[in-house]
């Protein structure tokens, strides 16, 4: 079972659009050094749909090196592509590198029915022995999982599901049904929102976007939860929710928000890949985010370290 706090980590690019391997490596190691338990690679945050398979494999290689350096870190690459063949190709490449599990969103852009989606996952499951997790993100895939489809995928050998929308009826049914039937199937929430209530129903892992720019807060929340310090966990949860609300109110896209908030902390976060663009450093949002970050860390009495880069 995957446990703890993972991150849907961003991929950092140069101004001209190439992968910035040095900054991407720095970012992975920085997050690991602040308690992040694993990486969910080349998903939405990681610009996977904007990259070739070869580029995604290069990111996985960096992640593998970083994980080995820190030890006991989970690698869960996202291999989902718009078509089956490239998805299977990437799943095989990830397995060859030696990852802990593989995640895949359903084939996206076109609207597919249940049979197409089931066959897509069947081909992935037949191609690799590494545990495979479905990624439920209907906002980007245009496909919404049903309990019926999840049951069929469990029969085919699906190891679990990363779920982002957190629809209570669907997710509790899937999780409790697996528990009652003693199925070897894990639910991972794809956001820090809902961490505490879903922990109490048996969820043991979160893939939190905030880990990209404030891993200390997520680490403290998860640490306190597993330690049974529920008052402290609730305190950290509320701080996380408040800070997340501030960041989301300033940006429509989480990838851009992650780059920008790292800059607000004084760290050179490079560039997202076009068509995504960062706001100019004269934008007052950088100062607002820096103040929100400092306030959140102060509420939890956590050290607030910053880089040397000055923006805004």
Image (tube, rainbow, N blue to C red):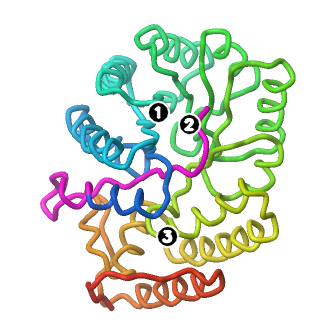
Q: Position of residue 238 (x, y in %)?
A: 73, 73
Which numbered mark, 3 or 2, is in the foreground of this view? 3
Q: Is residue 16 magenta?
A: yes
Is residue 44 left or right of 23 when viewed as pictured?
right
**Residue under label 3:** 214
The residue drawn where x is 60% and y is 48% is 4
Q: Nearer the viewer, residue 67 or 114?
A: 67
- Closer to the chain start, of discs 1 and 2, is 1
Which numbered mark, 1 or 3, is in the foreground of this view? 3
The residue drawn where x is 68% and y is 13% is 152
Kindly report the distance in space between the C-alpha atoms of the residues bearing marks 1 and 3: 30 Å
Q: Secondary structure at mark 1?
A: loop
Q: Are marks 1 and 2 in contact (CB under 8 Å)?
A: yes
The residue drawn where x is 63% and y is 18% is 114
Quadrant, the C terminus: bottom left
Q: Secondary structure at mark 3?
A: loop
Q: Nearer the viewer, residue 122 or 251?
A: 122
Kindly report the distance in space between the C-alpha atoms of the residues bearing marks 1 and 2: 6 Å
- Closer to the chain start, of discs 1 and 3, is 1
User: What span is colored magenta in the figure?
Assistant: 1-25
Kindly report the distance in space between the C-alpha atoms of the residues bearing marks 3 and 2: 30 Å
**Residue under label 2:** 142
Q: Secondary structure at mark 2?
A: loop
Q: Is residue 228 magenta?
A: no
Is residue 268 left or right of 232 when viewed as pictured?
left
**Residue under label 1:** 108
Measured along the vertical axis of the image, is residue 305 above or below residue 12?
Answer: below
Q: Nearer the viewer, residue 241 or 70?
A: 70
Q: Position of residue 183 (x, y in %)?
A: 75, 18
The residue drawn where x is 45% and y is 41% is 72
Mark 3 neighbour class, 10 Å CA radius: few under 14, some 14 to 19, many 20 or more: many
Is residue 180 left or right of 193 when viewed as pictured?
right
């Amino acid at each position: 079972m995957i446990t703890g706090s993972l991150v849907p980590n961003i991929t950092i690019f140069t101004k001209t659009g190439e992968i910035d391997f040095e900054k991407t490596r720095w970012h992975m190691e920085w997050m690991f050094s602040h308690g992040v338990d694993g990486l969910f690679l080349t998903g939405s945050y990681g610009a996977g749909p904007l990259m070739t398979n070869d580029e995604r494999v290069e990111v996985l290689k960096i992640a593998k090196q970083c994980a080995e350096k820190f030890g006991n870190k989970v690698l869960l690459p996202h291999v989902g592509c718009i078509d089956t063949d490239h998805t299977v190709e990437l799943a095989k490449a990830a397995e060859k590198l030696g990852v802990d599990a593989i995640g895949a969103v359903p084939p996206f852009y076109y609207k597919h029915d249940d049979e197409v989606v089931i066959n897509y996952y069947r081909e992935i499951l037949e191609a690799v022995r590494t545990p495979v997790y479905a990624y439920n993100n209907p906002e980007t895939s245009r496909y919404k999982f049903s309990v019926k489809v999840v049951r069929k995928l469990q029969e085919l050998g699906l190891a679990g599901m990363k779920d982002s929308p957190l629809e209570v009826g669907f997710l509790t049914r899937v999780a409790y049904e697996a528990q009652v039937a003693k199925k070897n199937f894990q639910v991972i929430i794809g956001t820090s929102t809902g961490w505490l209530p879903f922990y109490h129903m048996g969820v043991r892992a979160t893939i939190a976007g905030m880990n990209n720019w404030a891993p200390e807060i997520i680490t403290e929340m998860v640490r306190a939860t597993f330690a049974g310090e529920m008052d402290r966990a609730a305190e950290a949860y509320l701080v996380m929710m408040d800070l997340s609300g501030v960041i989301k109110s300033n940006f429509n896209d989480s990838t851009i928000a992650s780059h920008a908030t790292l800059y607000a902390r004084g760290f050179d976060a490079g560039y997202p890949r076009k068509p995504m663009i960062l706001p100019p450093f004269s934008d007052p949002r950088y100062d607002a985010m820096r103040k929100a970050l400092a306030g959140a860390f102060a509420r939890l009495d956590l050290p607030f370290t910053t880089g040397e880069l000055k923006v805004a």
